[in-house]
Image: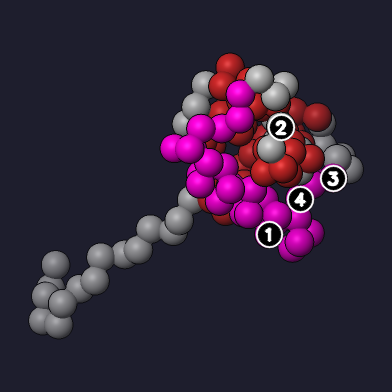
């Protein structure tokens, strides 16, 4: 398992979350986790970027999600949505030209 994949799992992401965030199958993530196959060169940068996002959330104290009053399913969901929101670049509003009334 690569250090980047370990970072994702240690932060509380489930293999299904990693698969969804990276647009790969759960089987592919399973192979990464058990060391059968490392991420290929086409996905390595995306894995690295996601791991950096997770590391930033950990540094900011947002991960790992603490259970408190949450059920395990709620912890899983909150973890996924925190990472998904942080990993998705914000959309920008269209720039309105001067004098454009639309």
Callout 2 secondary element:
loop
Name the residue located 12 percent from the left edge and 73 percent from the top edge: 101
> Of label 2 and label 4, which has the lower sequence position?
2
Is label 2 or label 4 in front? 2
Question: How many C-alpha atoms fall within 10 Å of the one at disc 2: few (<14), some, or many (≥20)?
Answer: some
27 to the left or right of 54: left
Q: Quadrant of the N terminus?
A: top right
Q: Which residue is labeled 2 in the image?
A: 1
Q: Secondary structure at mark 4?
A: loop
The local crowd at label 3, few if under 14, some if 14 to 19, many if 20 or more residues have their Cα within 10 Å, is few
Q: Would you name the residue on which mark 4 appears?
A: 63
Say the numbered circle drawn on residue 56: 1
Q: At 57% from the left edge and 42% from the top edge, which residue is drawn? A: 47
User: Residue 74 location in percent, x, y?
Assistant: 74, 34
Q: Which residue position holds label 3?
A: 66
Residue 72 sits above or below residue 45 on the image: above
Q: Say whether residue 30 is visible.
A: no
Q: Is residue 40 left or right of residue 7?
A: left
Question: For the magenta stretch, what is the residue range?
Answer: 37-66
Q: Nearer the viewer, residue 86 or 36?
A: 36
Which comes before the other along the chain, label 2 or label 1? 2
- In 3D space, how far apart are the residues under numbered discs 2 and 1 (Cα atoms)? 21 Å
- Label 1: element kind: helix
Q: Position of residue 90 (x, y in %)?
A: 44, 58
10 Å neighbourhood of mark 1: few (<14), some, or many (≥20)? some
């Amino acid at each position: 398992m690569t250090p980047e994949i370990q970072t994702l799992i240690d932060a509380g992401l489930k293999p299904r979350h990693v698969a969804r965030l990276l647009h790969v199958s759960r089987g592919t993530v399973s192979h990464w986790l058990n060391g059968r196959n490392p991420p290929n060169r086409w996905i390595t940068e995306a894995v690295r970027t996601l791991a950096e996002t997770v590391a930033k959330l950990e540094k900011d104290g947002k991960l790992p999600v603490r259970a408190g009053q949450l059920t395990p399913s709620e912890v899983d969901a909150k973890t996924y949505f925190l990472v998904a929101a942080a990993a998705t670049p914000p959309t920008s509003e269209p720039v309105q030209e001067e004098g454009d009334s639309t």
